[in-house]
Image: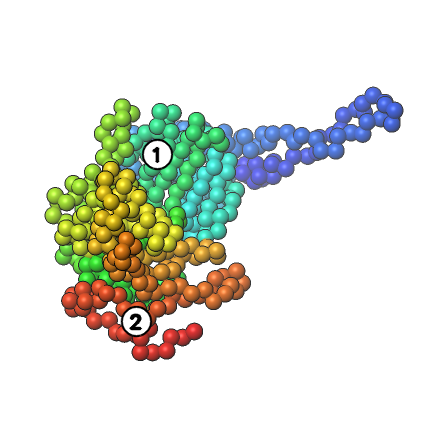
Amino acid sequence: MSLLRRIEKGTQQPTTPAGPAGPAGPAGPTPPTSRPTPAPSPLRDTYRDLKTRIQNKLIDELDPTMDVSRQDEVRRTIREMFENILAEERIVLSRAERERLFEQIVAEILGLGPLEPFLADPTVTEIMVNGPKNIYVERFGKIERTTASFESEEHLMRIIERIIAPLGRRIDESVPYQDARLPDGSRVNAIIPPLSLIGPVLTIRKFFKIPLTAEKLIELGSITPEAMEFLKACVHARLNIVVSGGTGTGKTTFLNVLSGYIPNDERIITIENAAELQLQQEHVVTLESRPPNIEGRGEVTIRDLVINSLRMRPDRIIVGECRGPEAFDMLQAMNTGHEGSMTTIHANSPRDALARLENMILMAGMDLPHRAIREQIASALDLIVQLERLRDGTRKVVSISAIEGMEGDIITMAEIFKFEIAGIENGKVIGRLRPTGIRPKFMDKIEAAGIHLPPTIFGIGERIRR
């Protein structure tokens, strides 16, 4: 029997024989313990020691000047060294076990260790590590626990540092949390003790290796073809759009899809905390904010980048997320010749999005009356697209609302599309995004851009299927 097979069988320990009976009491001899404490598995420790020993030997023998970005060449080199070490130590493994051990060691040397299988799994959208022994993943909108784990807190910390170090950042007791990204654009957040009481915590929101398209969103039922055709016309007509939604509703993904409709001959500047947008146009400038260093200096905020971008001759400015004073400068840009700009915002409804924008402008230290702030918002924004994660885990566009202007001190909106829930069947929410029959006031802008939408897109001239 091979080593790994003996290790797996060795995890089930035989029951420890009962010891001698205790002293007799009033009710007779004490019965032996029925559930003895299992002894640690020496075979499991043997496998861990074998893996660690081979891994450390490989690291010692690898050329430190090797270009790790050339994955295929590095894997071939590690494969040759791995086979040589097994031959030298006369370790007998089956082909499947040998491949499994090799992949685990390669994941430790070049990748993210136990997380590599989940990063390669296209059905996993989020990875949540709660300390070294608890790894959860999200599939199809549902969270499930996995059997994978890290060996120790030190092992998990090595993986976290491997993610953060290439970005020129650090994480330790003085800076116990960090935002980062993987090379494919996936968003990473890490927080460690003393702030986390369960050990290092790592959260990875995966980004699709192949960006989602409008056709895929329609196929998934996130939006209807009519609504997407309307939004495409709005982007071409250079309307200012805010994508609103709660955490995990797919705002960045949807913003990326909308950005795909921007003509290829325009200069686009994207501004984000962690670069996630994957624009396919040729003339794209990507900017990323920077946190302060250990001395508290060198910070570059989203607001700093928005102000700087105005001097870079942009046709459109795309801010990954407005969450603070940068909202004021973003609205200023929309009002001063940078039409067609887009951003996202955390809010549970279009009306909440307007209230949040108002609060963020006040955060910028602007001592303006509320009416003046609302007038600026009403003149800058044209459209709010509201996303929601439904109870069955699906992400859908639930509202598309046009900003119509002001009535007194209130910003008026007209809902162009609204998601109507028909019921729940087998745990799935049944419904459809339907036009309300209202044509927005900015239709003249769309038509001035040479785009003529048929009345049927707004539910006019034909019977809406119920």
Residue 262 location, quadrant: bottom left
Residue 78 in view of the camera:
no
* Residue 375 to residue 56: above or below: below
| Between discs 2 and 1, the one toward the N terminus | 1
Residue 187, image x and y in percent? 34, 43
Residue 52, image x and y in percent? 45, 30
Residue 164 in view of the camera:
yes
Residue 308 location, quadrant: top left
343, 252: nearer the viewer: 343
> For numbered disc 2, what is the local secondary structure?
helix
Measure the alpha-carbon separation of dots 2 and 1.
45 Å
> For numbered disc 1, what is the local secondary structure?
strand
Query: Which of the image's four quarters has the C terminus?
Result: bottom left
Query: Which of the image's four quarters has the N terminus?
Result: top right
Q: Check disc 2 and report the residue beneath it.
A: 457
Res 446 label:
none
Left or right of 128 in this view: 449? left
Left or right of 171 in this view: 300? left
Colour mode of the rendering? rainbow
Tell me what residue is drawn at x 60 percent, y 39 percent.
9
Tell me what residue is drawn at x 54 percent, y 30 percent.
45
Tell me what residue is drawn at x 29 percent, y 43 percent.
360
Tell me what residue is drawn at x 87 percent, y 26 percent.
28
Badge 2: residue crowd in 10 Å (few <14, some 14–19, many ≥20) = many
Res 178 label:
1
Residue 259, image x and y in percent? 24, 55
50, 36: nearer the viewer: 36
366, 149: nearer the viewer: 366
Badge 1: residue crowd in 10 Å (few <14, some 14–19, many ≥20) = some
Q: Nearer the viewer, mark 2 or mark 1?
A: 2
> What kind of residue is marked 1?
Gln
> What kind of residue is marked 2?
Ile
